[in-house]
Image (cartoon, rainbow, N blue to C red):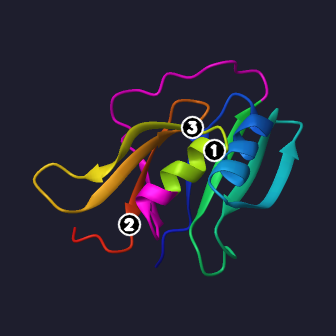
Amino acid sequence: MRLLHTMLRVTDLQRSIDFYTNVLGMTLLRSKDYPEGKFTLAFLGYGDESENTALELTHNWDTDSYELGTAYGHIAIEVDDVYAACDAIKARGGEVVREAGPMQHSTTVLAFVKDPDGYMIELLGTDRND
């Protein structure tokens, strides 16, 4: 068994694709419209889906907003250097909501970024000790 993908519902598909590709460096792997169901699925990631977990963005054509709820936490992305990743994300117009720095009660460096729909993305360095 392996984890295939995580799905997020988004309100503006192109804006979200732009964020995940241009700000976070993912690649759009595939996208398909389902006119009868009035939705589009777009899969993004850092490598081929046969070997890597993907992020599925679901755009329901007739939905303008979603409530994130209190159960959702975050998606975690590994980066080589959390400080440099935050600088690059800000330079590309991304919103860093928790600057890079050590996690409370730990030496693991992390940061948090918010996507266009308000979903939280945790950045973790490759040298973490979690």
Q: Earlier in the sequence, mark 1 or mark 3?
A: 1
Q: Quadrant of residue 46?
A: bottom right
Q: Identity of the amino acid at label 1?
A: Ala
Mark 3 is surrounded, within 10 Å at the Cα level, by few (under 14), some (14 to 19) or many (20 or more) other residues, namely some
Residue 13: image location, x then y, percent: 76, 37
| Residue 32 vs residue 105, the one in the foreground | 105
Q: Identity of the amino acid at label 3?
A: Asp
> On the rendered structure, is 52 left or right of 58?
left
Which label sits in the foreground, 1 or 3?
A: 1
Q: Which mark is residue 91?
A: 1
Say whether residue 71 is magenta: yes
Quote the CA–CA distance across marks 1 and 3. 15 Å
**Mark 1: secondary structure:** helix
Above or below: residue 87 compared with residue 58 = below
> On the rendered structure, is 51 left or right of 103?
right
**Residue drawn at x 40%, y 26% as measured from the top left:** 69
Say whether residue 66 is magenta: yes
**Residue drawn at x 38%, y 66% as measured from the top left:** 125
Residue position for label 2: 125
Q: Identity of the amino acid at label 2?
A: Gly
> On the rendered structure, is 31 left or right of 48?
right
| Residue 41 vs residue 45, the one in the foreground | 45
- Which stretch appears magenta? 61-84
